[in-house]
């Protein structure tokens, strides 16, 4: 099999580059077209209807770039728009929630899982639904952490203020007795080191980016969509508005290399 068409990946902004990093590491022969909606980020505080409308627009833009699959590298979009996208587009659509939920169920020993994410993701209950669909007895403690995204975007990945916020958000989940924590926002893998340090006890962190990449690999194999080596795999990054400082933060923290960022105004 050899399908050199790119995998289309999108996010509300730049956080989805954590998924791109995981995809590049796992699937080095696959070209990737990344689209970040920097004109309208953040999605976390927005209504489901608005997020669904934005998601259909971004997916349509990637389809016009001949994407062979769509990867929703955003928990907020994955939690409210996946069935809609799967219905509207003819290519496979993969989000971050189910792969993360599956990995969390494999990791937990005491069947008590914590989930953190944006307000929209937590309000949707998407992780609880995905977790309980497999194990009805699992306990889930979840918490919206709206201040973590701006701290990450400011590059405060290793900073006392960020550590304090992490502690404040996670304290109730730790007191509840979770043994596994789903990082339910594609920005959060950039804080994995800080969270592990602050929590300072044995909690398994489940990174939705890495688990999503594994799900993409399985899907490409199942649907015979893999690009065969040698394929001059490229990473194209397009944004709907000018990139801000966070692009440099993410590029450096993730050690991702890509060329000129394309400006792709919304239709
Ligand atoms: N990348 C988004 C997510 O994974 C968070 C940023 C936003 O609020 O748009 O949920």
Image (cartoon, rainbow, N blue to C red):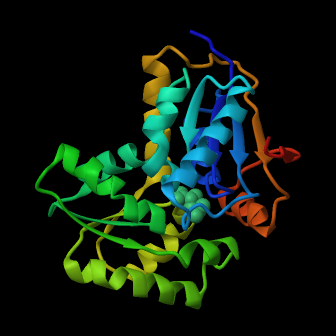
Residue pictured at 70% horizontal, 76% vertical:
154
- Would you say 48 lies left or right of 111 here? right
For the residue pair 125 and 175, the one nearer the viewer reads as 125
Pick the quarter of the image with the N terminus. top right
**Quadrant hosting residue 246:** bottom right
In-front residue for pair 53/25: 53
| Left or right: 262 in relation to 103 | right
Query: Which of 162 and 139 lies nearest the eye of the viewer?
Result: 139
Instruction: Give the farthest residue toward the front.
Output: 49
Confirm whether residue 40 shows in the render.
yes
Question: Residue at the spot x=59%, y=71% of the render?
Answer: 149
Q: Residue 30 in the image: state x and y as whole percent.
A: 64, 28
- State the residue in front, 263 or 193: 263
Q: Residue at x 66, y 26 (%)?
A: 67
Percent coordinates x, y for residue 178 in the rendering: 24, 71
Residue drawn at x 72%, y 34% is: 61
User: Count of labels shown?
Assistant: 0
Q: Report x, y in % for residue 35.
A: 71, 44
């Amino acid at each position: 099999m050899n399908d050199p068409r790119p995998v289309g990946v999108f996010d509300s902004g730049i956080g989805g580059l954590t998924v791109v990093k995981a995809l590049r590491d796992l699937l080095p022969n696959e070209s990737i077209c990344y689209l970040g909606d920097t004109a309208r980020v953040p999605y976390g505080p927005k209504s489901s209807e608005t997020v669904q409308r934005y998601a259909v627009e971004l997916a349509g833009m990637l389809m016009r770039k001949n994407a062979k699959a769509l990867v929703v590298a955003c928990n907020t979009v994955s939690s409210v728009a996946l069935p809609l996208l799967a219905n509207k587009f003819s290519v496979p659509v993969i989000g971050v929630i189910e792969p993360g939920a599956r990995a969390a169920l494999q990791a937990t020993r005491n069947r008590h899982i914590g989930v953190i994410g944006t307000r929209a993701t937590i309000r949707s209950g998407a992780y609880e639904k995905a977790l309980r669909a497999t194990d009805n007895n699992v306990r889930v403690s979840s918490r919206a952490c709206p201040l973590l995204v701006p701290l990450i975007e400011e590059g405060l990945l290793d900073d006392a203020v960020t550590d304090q916020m992490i502690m404040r958000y996670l304290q109730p989940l730790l007191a509840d007795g979770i043994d596994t924590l789903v990082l339910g926002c594609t920005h959060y893998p950039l804080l994995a080191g800080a969270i592990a340090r602050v929590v300072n006890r044995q909690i398994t962190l489940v990174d939705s980016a890495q688990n999503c990449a594994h799900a993409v690999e399985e899907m490409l194999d199942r649907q015979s969509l893999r690009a065969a080596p040698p394929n001059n795999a490229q990473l194209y990054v397009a944004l709907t508005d000018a990139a801000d400082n966070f692009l440099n933060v993410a590029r450096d923290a993730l050690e991702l290399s890509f060329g000129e960022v394309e400006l792709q105004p919304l239709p």
